[in-house]
Amino acid sequence: MKYFINSSRPTRRQMLTGMGVAAGGAALAIGAPGILRAQESPLVVVSGGGSYEDAIRKAIIEPFQKETGISVTYVTPASEAKLKAQVDSNNVQWDVMELSNPAFRPDANKYLEEIDYAAFDKETLDNLVPEAKTKYGVGSFVYSTVMAFSTVEYPVDKPRPTSWAEFWDISKFPGPRTLETCADGSTATVEFALLAAGVPKDKLYPIDLDKAFASLDRIKPQIAKFWSVGAEPGQMLSDRQVAMGSAWNGRMQALKDQGASIDYQWNEAQLSPTHWVVPKGAKNRAAAMKFAAYQASAQAQARLNNLIFYGPLNRAAFKYIEPKVAAQLPTAPDNLNKQYFANLEYWQTQSSSGKSNTDILVDRWAEWVAS
């Protein structure tokens, strides 16, 4: 999972976090203190560590415990392999966890509980974007893979590419590039290659790999490096090793706030949501569903996204997010309309060979890079 904390203006952000708990008020009061007496063991919540853990504890875990009386144990890191091992051994230790893909696997019904949307209030359900409401997972937040620039090479008064077709146009927009590798199953680069080849963003799926790699053949000589670590494109842009590249929006905004000579734009960016899932056979299933519903509420998502540079999946969250902060988030209305959601279900779908579409991409990528 790709988390980066919004560290700018920390005092104001901490204040907003505290105010957000108060603003949530009665609307977030799910459950009752009596639940604590009926709870045999703490609710085990599993997600990322480090700075993200600090943010989610402040924004969601602590107010959830206070408002519901449900005790929480937080565990990190989240691991799909461990989830499967627990279910396979009938020894499920985790109750609710945050991951990118398991809700879309073909075997999700074997490893995950269906999300009980009866635990959600109508306002939350009405305001969650469709991509957040899936059978086996409910959305937590979304990050974007955007097009970024060195402002030394491309200052604000100089034309910049505004589409991946223009990013591919070396004669009009010269300079070395960087794009994300697909070796680890990341999919943005092949999708950008199709956009560059003229495929509309609402017609990307099913992915035409032949067309995508033919498009990549055209840009390959200009790629200084296919990056695999989120810090790499920002470093290469800052050091002027590249003039432009794909990058995660959170990294770019953090560097901009630190004064780096970097900018980015939202057009044709890939939106990648993460979801909360409940392992099959979770001991605290009912409390896990309450947690999933709680974090999906507008106020809870607003508190979290006042601390991170990623976007809430509850549209009403923007009522509680400062406008200057909202403008930097992927799902702000003006930004959301320019982008497209990655189709996680497609990438997890298995072919007749038994491999997922992601596995097929990884194999094809390895052959292409070596050629």
Image (cartoon, rainbow, N blue to C red):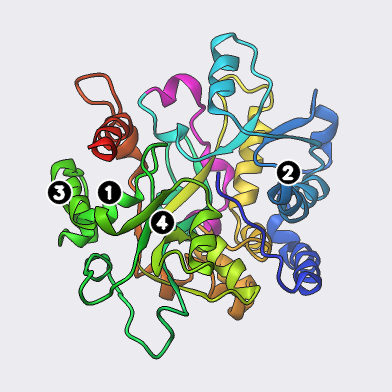
Q: Which residue is mark 1?
A: 190
Badge 1: residue crowd in 10 Å (few <14, some 14–19, many ≥20)? many
Tell me which residue sits at (21%, 69%) in the image. 169
Residue 35 in magenta? no
Disc 2 is placed on an element classified as: loop
Tell me which residue sits at (15%, 49%) in the image. 214
Q: Position of residue 89 (x, y in %)?
A: 59, 8
- Span colored in magenta: 107-125
Q: Is residue 151 above or below residue 97?
A: below
- Image position of 221 (left or right of 328): left
Badge 3: residue crowd in 10 Å (few <14, some 14–19, many ≥20)? few
Q: Is residue 252 above or below residue 226?
A: below
Kindly identify the amino acid type of the residue bearing the numbered disc 2: Gly
Does residue 188 show up? Answer: yes
Q: Which residue is mark 2?
A: 31
User: Which residue is at the far top?
Assistant: 89
Residue 109 in magenta? yes
Q: Is residue 73 above or below residue 14?
A: above
Disc 3 is placed on an element classified as: helix
State the quadrant of the N terminus: top right
Q: CA distance from mark 1 to mark 4?
A: 14 Å
> Foreground mark, 2 or 1?
1
Looking at the image, tell me whether mark 2 or mark 1 is earlier in sequence order.
2
Looking at the image, tell me whether mark 4 or mark 3 is earlier in sequence order.
3
Looking at the image, tell me whether mark 4 or mark 2 is earlier in sequence order.
2
Tell me which residue sits at (76%, 51%) in the image. 54
Disc 4 is placed on an element classified as: strand
